[in-house]
Image (cartoon, grey):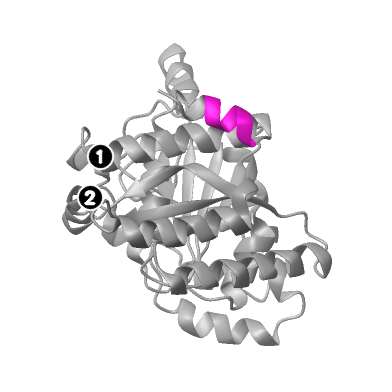
Amino acid sequence: MKNLLSAGLKKLRGEDSSVARGARPTSPPLGRRAHIIAIAAQKGGVGKTTTTVNLACALAQQPGARVLVIDIDPQGHVASSLKDAVRIAGTSLSDVLLSQTPRDLMDAVQQSDIDGLSLTPPDKALNETDTRLSTRVGREYILQAAMARARAEFDWVLIDCPPNLGNLTLNALVAADRVLVPCDMSILAFEGVADLLGTVRVVNDRLRHPLEVLGILRTRVDGRTQQINDAIGGALDDNYRALLLETSIPVNSALAQAQAAGKSIFQYAPTSRGAHAYRALAREVTGRVTSGGPESARRAARP
């Protein structure tokens, strides 16, 4: 009897090592309140998924942290970026979003081989889901409603959004507390920032959801193109100085190689410039979220 009680306590605490990869994560006692961050950009190719994956892995390195990545992008690149640590199985996100009766997002959550990190599986059917959501009453709030348990079971939830402003992105923004906006050093990405910030205003004003802009993240910063960096960086600073994060992500071949290998940058090249940048980003994000201001975030981001 004593052994049975001991085993039961281990399961309740999440200490049972028999939980198989791909299974739903063992639930701790409810009582956490996740910081939910949508990573969104109007333009593709700006490092959105790379940022989602590596920021999530950096946050998961915090002692005792539980992190969930929701891949609401039909391309499903989160799982391919971490294919070395995940197995695809279980309920799809489309099943949750299109159910005629309310569904729990946790039905689609799987545990990875990376300590503290869980995720939803890739779902090509999300392309059709985006269209079908147009016919649903209260369509912008479906993901938010499905996340009640997830909010209480995780410390951080990151949502990888599609590179557009459709129904799936609106669901992510309404479910989130904050939005992180990656912007590479290109004019199209710069123009897309204004469109996305306009959507944030719609979410605040028309949908009555208090969504904050966590910050604008400069990505794919190439030291060899200083003139372009100065032009785009200067425009970002002139227009969005208060929102611009101090951390920037450099062009780093290790980031692309890690993604191709299906590993986080911390597994693939932990001492690379890309790894250092995403650790700094995690510190800055944590500082802004927990202290509520860019000054404290800048202090937290310093080594």
Q: Residues within 10 Å of mark 2 (few under 14, many from 20)?
A: some
- Figure check: 30 above or below 74: above
Q: Residue at x 64, y 40 (%)?
A: 152
Q: Secondary structure at mark 2?
A: loop
Q: Which residues are magenta?
A: 294-299
Residue 212 x, y percent position in the rendering: 69, 51
> Foreground: 229 or 43?
229
- Residue 40 located within the stretch drawn in magenta: no
- Figure check: 303 above or below 136: above
- Figure check: 75 above or below 49: below
Q: Which residue is mark 2?
A: 252
Q: Identify the mark at residue 231; answer none if there is no mark.
A: none
> Foreground: 222 or 199?
222
Q: Residue at x 66, y 37 (%)?
A: 33
Distance Cα–Cα, label 2 vs label 1: 7 Å
Which numbered disc, 2 or 1, marks the residue that appears first in the sequence?
A: 2
Q: Identify the mark at residue 273; answer none if there is no mark.
A: 1
The residue furthest top is: 2
